[in-house]
Image (tube, rainbow, N blue to C red):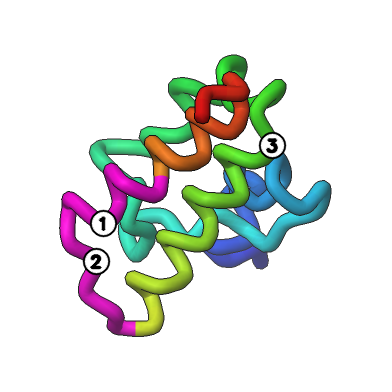
Amino acid sequence: MRTANEHRQLCTIELIAEGHAERCPGEACAFWDRGCALERVESELGGRREVAELLLDLRRELEAGRTIEIEEARSRFAHLLNEDEAIA
Protein backbone atom coordinates (compact mmCIF):
# COMPACT_ATOMS: atom_id res chain seq x y z
CA MET A 1 0.00 0.00 0.00
CA ARG A 2 1.25 3.49 -0.82
CA THR A 3 1.62 6.22 1.76
CA ALA A 4 0.30 9.77 1.32
CA ASN A 5 3.89 10.94 0.80
CA GLU A 6 4.24 8.67 -2.23
CA HIS A 7 1.32 10.45 -3.89
CA ARG A 8 2.90 13.89 -3.57
CA GLN A 9 4.39 15.39 -6.67
CA LEU A 10 7.98 16.51 -6.88
CA CYS A 11 8.94 19.88 -5.41
CA THR A 12 8.38 22.59 -8.01
CA ILE A 13 11.11 24.93 -6.80
CA GLU A 14 13.74 22.20 -6.50
CA LEU A 15 13.00 21.00 -10.04
CA ILE A 16 13.45 24.49 -11.47
CA ALA A 17 16.46 25.46 -9.35
CA GLU A 18 18.37 22.18 -9.40
CA GLY A 19 16.87 20.03 -12.14
CA HIS A 20 15.96 17.28 -9.66
CA ALA A 21 13.72 17.16 -6.62
CA GLU A 22 12.47 15.35 -3.57
CA ARG A 23 8.76 14.90 -2.98
CA CYS A 24 6.85 18.07 -2.13
CA PRO A 25 7.00 18.70 1.64
CA GLY A 26 3.42 19.97 1.60
CA GLU A 27 2.32 22.01 4.59
CA ALA A 28 5.83 21.89 6.06
CA CYS A 29 7.05 24.14 3.22
CA ALA A 30 7.38 27.89 3.74
CA PHE A 31 5.74 28.40 0.33
CA TRP A 32 2.62 26.37 1.13
CA ASP A 33 -0.62 28.33 1.17
CA ARG A 34 -3.60 26.03 0.58
CA GLY A 35 -1.34 24.34 -1.95
CA CYS A 36 2.03 25.10 -3.43
CA ALA A 37 2.26 28.85 -4.01
CA LEU A 38 5.20 28.37 -6.36
CA GLU A 39 3.34 25.86 -8.50
CA ARG A 40 0.94 28.69 -9.33
CA VAL A 41 3.81 30.77 -10.78
CA GLU A 42 5.81 27.86 -12.19
CA SER A 43 5.60 29.13 -15.78
CA GLU A 44 7.18 32.46 -14.76
CA LEU A 45 9.89 30.76 -12.69
CA GLY A 46 10.76 28.30 -15.44
CA GLY A 47 12.84 30.88 -17.28
CA ARG A 48 14.28 32.44 -14.12
CA ARG A 49 16.42 29.73 -12.57
CA GLU A 50 18.32 32.27 -10.47
CA VAL A 51 15.07 33.42 -8.85
CA ALA A 52 14.11 29.80 -8.18
CA GLU A 53 17.53 29.24 -6.60
CA LEU A 54 17.07 32.25 -4.32
CA LEU A 55 13.61 31.06 -3.28
CA LEU A 56 14.98 27.60 -2.56
CA ASP A 57 17.82 29.09 -0.50
CA LEU A 58 15.31 31.15 1.50
CA ARG A 59 13.15 28.07 2.10
CA ARG A 60 16.12 26.06 3.30
CA GLU A 61 17.19 28.85 5.65
CA LEU A 62 13.70 28.96 7.13
CA GLU A 63 13.63 25.17 7.46
CA ALA A 64 16.94 25.36 9.33
CA GLY A 65 15.30 27.68 11.85
CA ARG A 66 16.84 30.94 10.67
CA THR A 67 14.66 34.02 10.93
CA ILE A 68 14.62 36.08 7.77
CA GLU A 69 13.45 39.66 7.96
CA ILE A 70 11.17 40.86 5.17
CA GLU A 71 13.59 43.66 4.30
CA GLU A 72 16.45 41.18 3.95
CA ALA A 73 14.40 39.02 1.57
CA ARG A 74 13.36 42.10 -0.43
CA SER A 75 16.96 43.26 -0.63
CA ARG A 76 18.11 39.87 -1.89
CA PHE A 77 15.38 39.84 -4.55
CA ALA A 78 16.08 43.42 -5.61
CA HIS A 79 19.80 42.70 -5.93
CA LEU A 80 19.10 39.61 -8.03
CA LEU A 81 16.57 41.36 -10.25
CA ASN A 82 18.84 44.37 -10.73
CA GLU A 83 21.69 42.06 -11.78
CA ASP A 84 19.35 40.25 -14.14
CA GLU A 85 18.27 43.52 -15.76
CA ALA A 86 21.87 44.82 -15.80
CA ILE A 87 20.94 47.76 -13.58
CA ALA A 88 23.87 49.18 -11.65
Q: How many marks?
A: 3
Q: Which residue bears the numbered disc 1?
A: 72
Q: Position of residue 70 (x, y in %)?
A: 17, 52
Which is in the foreground here, disc 2 or disc 1?
Answer: 1
Report the magenta residues as a range: 65-76
- Secondary structure under tag 2 reads loop
Q: Which residue bears the numbered disc 2?
A: 68
Q: Is residue 63 above or below residue 10?
A: below
The numbered mark, 2 or 3, whose residue comes first in the sequence reads 3
Q: Amino acid at mark 3?
A: Arg
Q: Nearer the viewer, residue 46 or 79?
A: 79
Which is in the foreground here, disc 3 or disc 1?
Answer: 1
Which quadrant of the figure has residue 1? bottom right
| Residue drawn at the location 53% of the way across and 55% of the way down | 56
Q: Position of residue 58 (x, y in %)?
A: 42, 60
Asked if the residue at tag 1 contacts the one at tag 2, i.e. Cβ–Cβ closer than 8 Å, the answer is: yes
